[in-house]
Image: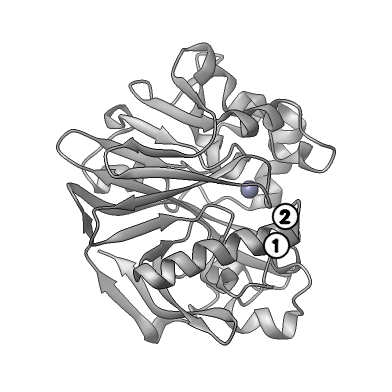
Amino acid sequence: MTSFRDLPNPHADSLKNLQLKVGDYEIHAVPTGLFGLDGGAMFGTVPKVLWEKSNPSDSANRIAMEARALLLKSPTHRILIDCGIGGDFIAKYGDKLGAKFEEMYAIDRGATSLEGSLKRLGLTTDDITHVIFTHLHFDHAGAATKAENGKVVPTFKNAKHFVQRANLETARHPNRREKASYFGVNFEAVIANHQMEILDGPVKDLLPGVSVAITNGHTIGQQYVRISDGKNTVYYCGDLIPTSSHVRLPWVMGYDLRPLELIEEKAVLLEQAAQESAYLFFEHDPYLDLVNVIADRGDFAVRDRFRLT
Ligand SMILES: [Zn+2]
């Protein structure tokens, strides 16, 4: 038996270290913990002989996945984009589903956590001023609430949170397929506590230098985030491009609701990123934080791979 946790990083030799500032913001990766997912589900119709080179799988066919938030830190703002799966599974989801979560996602409590990663940056969850949700799937928004004295409460008690209305609607009334990914317990307490601002469509300068745009291929009303000062630009791709392996246009997840629409949306973002020499930040890539991309014979390819320092 091998575990996805013990597999070597196939990009180890090509990773470059990067210290990045965009405008007033220091850009920091906030890994919240590795989990495992079925490799086939992550790559849809792409055969294993192709994906296993960049994403080796363990004896249960699981590949490593990160749940990586992004922190924008300025003297006035500490903005978190997505926040990971969180914990308190039994308390939040109930005995049966909570135990299933523990087992299915093989979460390692001893390893990286949201709180631990913030602590390394000198912060606690109370210091976060804003949380932008790309969408409310549990692996992106689960940590937004926690169990406290038998109640579920917001984790970031001083933060204003943002979500798209279309995504909130779909999260509250999920289709049969997404029922296993949207849980009110992860976000209703934020709304009840008047900490959620609900957005209707793309917003330019939602926060200084931070804009959001909408895509619907992965799930309805997902937003990706653009952070730019005119010189450096970073995109937080969410599940539009979950890992650097998904830069190739036909490499889409089995989880995506509308794969053909997603490919078109991805092409728009990649074209823009290639032209701007922008950085793409990946939420789920276990091996790196960001890349830049080039156009490549009608498709796109990774140029450089980076780890934020
Ligand atoms: Zn998702």
Q: Quadrant of residue 72?
A: top left
The residue depicted at 60 percent of the width and 82 percent of the height is: 298
Provide residue 119's location: percent of width, then percent of height: 27, 42
Give whichever of 305, 259 is nearer the camera.
259
Q: Nearer the viewer, residue 280 or 184?
A: 280
x, y (%) of residue 95?
A: 73, 29
Mark 2 residue crowding within 10 angstroms, few (<14) / some (14–19) / many (20+): many
* CA gap, disc 2 and disc 1: 5 Å
In-front residue for pair 176/59: 176
For residue 66, which numbered disc appears in the image? none
Q: Which residue is mark 2?
A: 256
Residue assigned mark 1: 253
Find numbered disc 2 in the image and state the secondary structure of the residue it sits on.
loop
Q: Are marks 2 and 1 in contact (CB under 8 Å)?
A: yes
Res 288 visible: no
Q: Is residue 288 left or right of residue 207?
A: right
Tag 2: amino acid: Asp
Residue kind at label 1, given as amino acid type: Met
- Is residue 305 something one can see in this rendering? yes
Q: In percent of the image, x 40 and y 34: which residue is there?
A: 131
Residue 81 drawn at (x, y percent): 42, 43
* Residue count near mark 1 (Cα–Cα under 10 Å), binned few <14, some 14–19, many ≥20: many
Position of residue 128 relative to residue 268, above or below, is: above
| Residue 5 placement: quadrant | bottom right
Relative to 98, is 212 above or below?
A: below
